[in-house]
Amino acid sequence: MVNGKEAFTEEFVLHRIGAEGEASVFSDFSAVIKGEEEQQFLRKLFLRPFANMAFTCEFAEKKNALQELCTKIYDGESIVENSEAIAKHLITSAQDSKLPGGDLIIAKFSGVQIGSAEHEAVGIFKFDEKEVFLESKLKDDAIALRMQRGLGNNKPNKACLVVFTGKSSTLFIIDNQASTEYWQRDFIGSRAKKDNVNSTSDLMSVTKTFITEQLPQDFVVEKADQIDLLNRSVQYFKSHDEFDKEEFATEVFQQEGTIQSFNQYSDRFQQENDVKLQDNFEISAHAVKRQARVFKSVLKLDKNFHIYIHGDRNKIEHGVDESGRKFYKIFYEEES
């Protein structure tokens, strides 16, 4: 979703957040590193963790402390002063929780790509622990070794990338401890964004749970038929640029009773989860790619066989023999 391969880290500030009972240390300078090798490392450290995300958020309220501070950095105001304010806002937001000590980095980026457009962005990254690495140096024809601690391959424990995408910023959030509500609720103040990425993910998720959980309760349906419906629904999202609910239901479910059951399930899902599923939207190819991974097309028979069904449902038949043993009959043209 986030392509940072051509992005540039303009500058960043590192503050040290003290653990419980320890004082925090706030930097009074920013780092500007322009070398290509260094920039490549910073892109890997800061932006690569967001590359495969298929869920977007936005600020929930118009007046939001983090939003105002990030906007000031975006507008060119001091990143040192505003990053310190962000750090203090985090400490205040987590005062009722056990905030782990660690490094808090606030960085400003240009050239962050979402789709085909490039944007500026501000990132907040919380690293709770440093990793250990071995440093070697050549000194006076001798090799000196020492263990060091720092940031490198480990992903941040928590992060928020604020991408300035026009009127409404787009947020990408990392929260490795989802039980700590302070990060998303109190510190960021986020909610799901009503865009085509989330619309695609939500509809695919609802379709999957309907086929695998609700449909067997409403009708007598064979496992192979469920897999066929999963395959057809994924194929719809892959082969269409625009989603149309009526067209989707007709192409995938076909039978009027199943279509009605899907619509009722969709309505109930929206009421119970307080979300709005759009009837028409542009399909996000990235979200389809991510969601399609959880659409399983495997028919498991006892512990002996796995049958992968990717195509024509008419080439597999289910039955029971005279002794009561269940079987599947498979028709094919070529063996490879």
Image (spheres, rainbow, N blue to C red):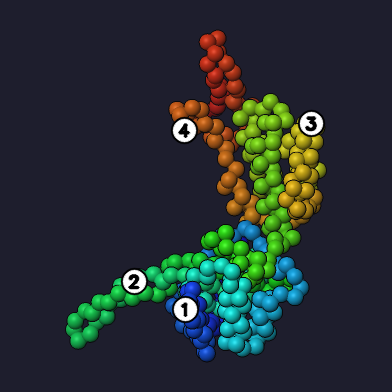
- In the rendered image, the vertical position of residue 31 relative to residue 183, given as above or below: below
Q: Earlier in the sequence, mark 3 or mark 1?
A: 1
Q: Earlier in the sequence, mark 4 or mark 1?
A: 1
Residue to which mark 4 is pinned: 336
* Callout 4–callout 1 Cβ contact below 8 Å: no
Q: Position of residue 90 (x, y in %)?
A: 59, 75
Give the secondary structure at mark 4: loop
Residue to which mark 3 is pinned: 257
Q: Earlier in the sequence, mark 1 or mark 2?
A: 1
Q: Residue furthest top?
A: 322
Q: Which mark is residue 22?
A: 1
Residue kind at label 1, given as amino acid type? Glu
Residue to which mark 2 is pinned: 133
Q: Earlier in the sequence, mark 4 or mark 3?
A: 3
Q: CA distance from mark 4 to mark 1?
A: 65 Å
Q: CA distance from mark 1 to mark 2?
A: 26 Å
Horizontally, is 236 left or right of 325 in the view? right
Give the secondary structure at mark 2: strand
The residue at 21%/79% (across/down) is 143
Quadrant assignment for the N terminus: bottom right
Q: Position of residue 319 (x, y in %)?
A: 59, 18
Horizontally, is 33 left or right of 230 in the view? left
Q: Residues within 10 Å of mark 2 (few under 14, many from 20)?
A: few
Q: Earlier in the sequence, mark 2 or mark 3?
A: 2
The residue at 57%/47% (across/down) is 293
Q: Is residue 310 visible?
A: yes
Residue kind at label 2, given as amino acid type? Phe
Q: Nearer the viewer, mark 4 or mark 3?
A: 3
Q: Is residue 239 visible?
A: no
Horizontally, is 173 left or right of 214 in the view? left
